[in-house]
Image (tube, rainbow, N blue to C red):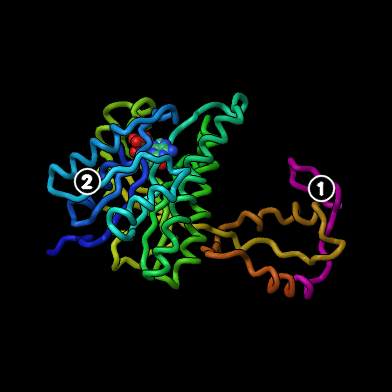
Amino acid sequence: MSKLRYDGQVVVVTGAGGGLGREYCLYFASRGASVVVNDLGGSFKGEGKSTKAADVVVDEIKAAGGKAVANYDSVTDGEKIIETAIKNYGRIDVLINNAGILRDISFKNMKDQDWDLIIAVHVKGSYKCARAAWPYFRKQKYGRVINTASAAGLFGSFGQCNYSAAKLAMVGFTETLAKEGAKYNIHANVIAPIAASRMTETVMPPDILANLKPDWVVPLVAVLVHKDAEENGSIFEVGGGHVAKLRWERSSGLLLKADDTYTPGAILKKWDQVSDFKNAEYPTGAADFMGLLEKSMEMGPNDKGETLDFKGKVALV
Ligand code: NAI
């Protein structure tokens, strides 16, 4: 069986001095790609910087006979990272937005600085790198982007309000890049990984971490960024040998007459229909509000009883 190869391609991985980023770099270099190993080299809280983290990975790749170059800029200066790819290798084919930090703190105690730094690294950083790569992708009618979300973003996580907001932003960002890039053969997908790294080593027990090897996230990413892959705009959970896809679900919903009988009471009386997922759909776009409005106009007036009692939902009047 032939192996996936990336010969002649240039892969940029941000935050690649350790954890997941390092694994991506080692893999793509071992499969023929030239790799830009970006890392600011600071702490997991985003303090300080150093060239060592990226250098160690570049040395490792070179020692194994691969091609790699280091970049030490912050992802918030994404254009400099992409420039490193262009200057050294003349092109960019794959961008893996992976750099990340944590500033965990309860919402009650969160400071603007905790919020701003997280949004800057994850959201602005991913934007800056993708924005700088985009003209090259469009021109060559080819590009692959992986953005990195998190279960914290998809489901919420105590003490991670800033991180959750930034990580769910990666989903909307990816879905739009996928739509705008499709006709240029630019595909963007987003992963919510789980793996042992310095980010998780303080919050998970060692026996669990032993079963969450960071290189087990690599195979999915390898598939998604391959030139023959068609997947675009999808959300995946990946880790510990498990890969699953997530999608939006919309209940068939409640449609009422839109007139002066459309009241809180009218909604409450039929609340069960709002959250009835029996005949749910899996949308890739907003509901057809114009079509629904037309139907709504044809309906008779609502039962608008206004005496509300949330315990029994509504007191019918
Ligand atoms: P890690 O801490 O080992 O790797 C992140 C790397 O990003 C570090 O080497 C760090 O120096 C670098 N970095 C931080 N700020 C940077 C900046 N401004 N510019 C350039 N580089 C910067 O953590 P890990 O676990 O490998 O995380 C990789 C990505 O996966 C992150 O986006 C993280 O939020 C995400 N993630 C990881 C999970 C896990 O279970 N390990 C769970 C969910 C999401």
Q: Residues within 10 Å of mark 2 (few under 14, many from 20)?
A: many
Q: Is residue 163 above or below residue 89?
A: above
Mark 2 vs mark 1: give the one in front: 2
Residue 64, image quadrant: top left
Q: Residue at x 81, y 63 (%)?
A: 302
Q: Residue at x 82, y 56 (%)?
A: 263
Q: Residue at x 28, y 27 (%)?
A: 206
Q: Is residue 61 visible?
A: yes
Q: Name the amino acid type tagged 1.
A: Ala
Mark 1 = which residue?
A: 315
Image quarter (top left, top right, bottom left or bottom right) of the N terminus: bottom left
Q: Which mark is residue 123?
A: none
Secondary structure at badge 2 equals helix
Q: Is residue 208 magenta?
A: no
Instruction: Point out the tag, 2 or 1, that comes first from the N-terminus.
Output: 2
Secondary structure at badge 1 equals loop
Q: Is residue 2 above or below residue 41?
A: below
Q: Is residue 241 visible?
A: no
Mark 2 = which residue?
A: 26
Q: Position of residue 143 (x, y in %)?
A: 37, 63
Please indicate whether residue 39 sits to the left or right of residue 108 in the image. Answer: left
Q: Is residue 313 magenta?
A: yes
Q: Position of residue 212 (x, y in %)?
A: 28, 38
Q: Name the amino acid type tagged 2.
A: Leu
Which is the main secondary structure of the residues drawn in magenta? loop
Q: Residues within 10 Å of mark 1 (few under 14, many from 20)?
A: some
Pointers 2 and 1 in contact (CB under 8 A)?
Answer: no
Q: Position of residue 282 (x, y in %)?
A: 51, 63
Q: Position of residue 237 (x, y in %)?
A: 38, 49
Please indicate whether residue 151 sits to the left or right of residue 51 in the image. Answer: right
Give the Cα separation between the discs numbered 2 and 1: 64 Å
Q: Which residues are magenta?
A: 296-317
